């Protein structure tokens, strides 16, 4: 993501949400570009009568990787 795209993105997000989303975007881009993975973001799964969120799932020839992203 270019510096200009980050500036546009940052202008639309509240600060707490922005930090987490920017971290997920950076991680996602690294997995896609550097590791050549197919990436899924923000997956919700039912768990004990509620939903549990998985931030990032990376899929490659080596396996499936589940990422909890903190920024």
Image (cartoon, grey):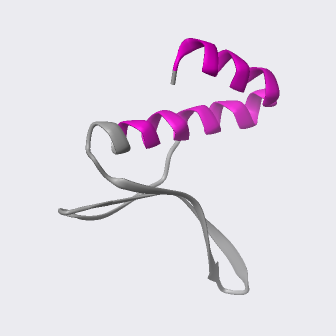
Please identify the residue farthest to the left as the structure is shown. Answer: 62
Residue 17 on the magenta segment: yes
Q: Which residues are magenta?
A: 2-30
Q: Give coordinates of residue 64: x percent, y percent.
A: 31, 66
Please tell me which residue is depicted at 48% across the width and 53% down the height of the picture.
68
Asked whether 57 or 69 is in front, the reply is 57
User: Residue sitting at 35 percent across and 44 percent down?
Assistant: 31
Could you say where residue 15 lies in the image, as x and y percent from the top left?
76, 27
Tell me: 36 left or right of 1. Answer: left
Viewer can see residue 33: yes
Relative to residue 16, is residue 6 depicted above or below?
A: above
Which residue does the image show at 48% across and 33% down from the upper left?
A: 26
Residue 71 shows up from this direction: no
Dominant SS of magenta comes to: helix
Question: Who's the residue at 66% across and 86% down the image?
Answer: 48
Image quadrant occupied by the C terminus: top right
Q: Tell me where residue 34 appears, x and y as whole percent.
A: 27, 37
């Amino acid at each position: 993501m270019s510096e200009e795209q980050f500036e546009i993105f940052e202008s639309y997000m509240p600060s707490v949400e922005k930090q987490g989303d920017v971290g997920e975007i950076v991680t996602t881009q690294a997995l896609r570009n550097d590791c050549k993975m197919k990436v899924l973001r923000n997956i919700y799964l039912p768990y004990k009568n509620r939903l549990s969120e998985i931030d990032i799932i990376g899929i490659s020839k080596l396996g499936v990787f589940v990422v909890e992203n903190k920024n």
